[in-house]
Image (cartoon, helix red, strand yellow):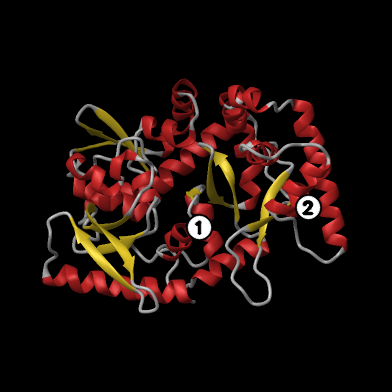
Amino acid sequence: MPAEITSPTPRVMGRLRLVSQGLLGGGFPTVPDAVRWMTCMQAQDLGSALWAVGQRVPGTAASDVRAALDAGTVVRSWPMRGTLHLLAPEDLQWILSITGGRLMNSLAGRHRELGITSEDISHCRDIAFKTAEDLKAGGAPGASREQLFQAFEDAGQITKAQRGIHLLGSLCQRAWLVQGPMAGANGKVGVQQLFVPFDEWIPDSRELDRQEGIAELLFRYVRSHGPATIKDFAWWSQIPLTEARAALNEVQDRLVELQIGGSSYWLSPETAAMLDDDVPGSRSLLALPGFDEFLLGYQDRSLVLAPEFAELVVPGKNGVFKRIMVSGGEVVGTWARTGGKAVAVEAEPFAGVLGPAAERSFHAQGRAYLKFMAG
């Protein structure tokens, strides 16, 4: 059994999470290194995802993350919770094999409403492969969503009323298609990705059976997100709690347990070792993007975000996370990008004002963000 350590404060727990996520202590050397460590990084909003990586890889620019997507050293797909994430290409297929079935079962009712059958999905697979092949022959690196929808329509597959989105998502969930390079042309920065056949874009995938894969996913989640509970993992991955607990039995000898308020939090031994000294970052202030894994990657976010401020981060509980300021391991406010041509950043602290040192740190973070996004 792992050693037990008791009662770090919530702020210390938050700083341990910052360390685990590469947000304190120097980060990672490359974009693929950061993404591979995090396993899955929420990326429904691409701009937020770019900065989430940038905060973990010092000295990079948004163009470096886009270049990784263009090169296929990082992929963006729907591995869990029906939302887009960044992940290492070799990890996508085995994670889909664990999570995809449950997601597709949850969509079965909606597919019946839309008149989508398994034959329709197979038909659209063949259409998509032919479309991608024809475009490739003409020098295009992939097919846009609009090109695929037009091809579906031409073959009698209706795409209106979200039917096209569900057909395309089903092809990606089955690892027949994957999002590939950005769709920019003529020197313009792309805002969408092109779709390509999965096996062409990701020729080498790891193979893990379900039990082995869940254990691997849990271990990597705790290593990159800990301290975290088993319920946090089950929510994040959408793996049934019974299977998550069984996986914990397989990996807990490589983890450390913290007992706090009757709950078990798990983290890596390397992160736990920092409790022997002062955990770094007590004076740190970070301007993190909306949807960052530091906040979104847990079922219970009250450890780092006081419940009374939760609606200031997710107004109306609408699922849209605002950018957050994190001071010493605690979410202390939100921030916004303002202006038109003269772009700037503006702090929105919960307490109404930042102290002088925190104000200076925030503006340094703001300058780093603007430089990153412009690069």
The residue lying at 57 percent from left, 41 percent from top is: 79
Q: Identify the element where label 1 is drawn.
A: helix
Counting from the top left corner in percent of width and height, residue 122 is at 79, 33
Q: What percent of the width, then of the height, locates residue 134?
A: 87, 56
Residue 299, compared with residue 283, is above or below; it is: above
Residue 282's spot in the image, x, y percent? 19, 59
Disc 2 marks a residue whose amino acid type is: Glu
Residue 112: percent from the left, percent from the top?
65, 22
**Viewer-side residue, 334 vs 200:** 334
Q: Which disc, if any, is residue 4?
A: none
Secondary structure of the residue carrying tag 2 is: helix
Task: From the viewer's side, name the closer residue of 346 and 72.
Answer: 346
Whether residue 327 can be seen here: yes
Task: Measure the C-alpha gap from mark 1 to mark 2.
Answer: 23 Å
Crowding near the residue tagged with mark 1, few <14, some 14–19, many ≥20 C-alpha atoms within 10 Å: some
- The residue located at (69%, 26%) in the rendering is 115
Q: Specify whether 286 is left or right of 373.
A: left
Residue tagged 2? 200
Quadrant hosting residue 327: bottom left
Toward the viewer: 308 or 12? 308
Q: Residue at x 17, y 68 (%)?
A: 358
Q: Is residue 7 left or right of residue 205?
A: left
Q: Classify 10 Å Cα crowding around label 2: few (below 14), some (14-19), many (20 and above).
A: few
The type of residue carrying mark 1 is: Leu
Please report the residue visible at 68 percent of the width from the left and 76 percent of the height from the top.
186
Q: Which quarter shows the N terminus?
A: top left
Q: Earlier in the sequence, mark 1 or mark 2?
A: 1
Which mark is on residue 46?
1
Question: Does 189 sit above or below residue 312?
Answer: below
